Image: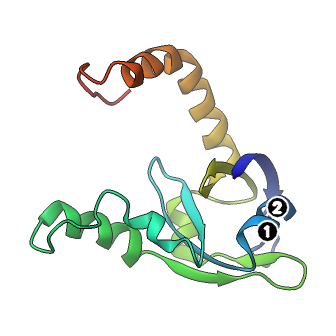
Amino acid sequence: MLLGRYDSKISSKFQISYPVKFRKEMGEKLIATKGLENCLIIVSEEGWKTLLEGTEGQPFTSKPTRQVQRYLLGNAQQIELDSKGRFILPEYLRTYANLAEDVVFAGIERFVEVWDKNTWEEEQKRLMGSIETIAEKLSNPAQKDTDE
């Protein structure tokens, strides 16, 4: 299971070191794509179907299905770690997630999120103010789902 937070930096050559713990679990061949809330998602090459959750089995004629798949798969990039566990993200992914220097890798069970450190800290503060309400909504599915 992927969990925990690991901080890293983007070098002047745009290289990022991938956390050893995640490397051991996910391997050296990964897929990165745009996530939600302006972060990136990284999955193992074998676990790429994680990106299709919620759309599998849906008809191709379903516009929301096509849109989600287009967003996640159309922006995906295969990445391979070098011998030191480093990789380079394409500029369009770095720009999307506002990655400049300090980054946070967060293990989220089956995938890893990559955040700009400042954006991660802002998200954590926001969550601290609403996590009880969010947890309550999850325990009571009848409650209306709203964006926090």
User: How far across and down, in percent of the image, does residue 44 sit?
Assistant: 62, 72
As helix, strand or loop, the secondary structure at mark 2 comes to loop
As helix, strand or loop, the secondary structure at mark 1 comes to helix
> 15 and 85: which one is in front?
85
Q: Disc 1 marks which residue?
A: 23
Image quadrant in which you'd find residue 45:
bottom right
User: How far across and down, in percent of the image, does residue 78 sit?
Assistant: 58, 83
Image quadrant in which you'd find residue 133:
top left
- 137 w.r.t. 87: above or below: above
- 132 w.r.t. 47: above or below: above
Give the residue furthest to the left.
61
User: Would residue 34 be found to the left or right of residue 59 on screen?
Assistant: right
Marks 2/1: CA distance?
6 Å
Q: How is the image coloured?
A: rainbow
> 18 and 28: which one is in front?
28
Write the residue at 83% across / 59% down: 21
Q: Amino acid at mark 2?
A: Pro
- 34 w.r.t. 92: above or below: above
Write the residue at 64% across / 82% down: 79
Q: Disc 2 marks which residue?
A: 19
Say which quadrant the C terminus sits in: top left
Write the residue at 70% across / 46% down: 117
User: How far across and down, in percent of the image, does residue 94 sit?
Assistant: 59, 67
Q: Amino acid at mark 1?
A: Arg
User: Would residue 79 be found to the left or right of residue 65 on screen?
Assistant: right
Image quadrant in which you'd find residue 74:
bottom left
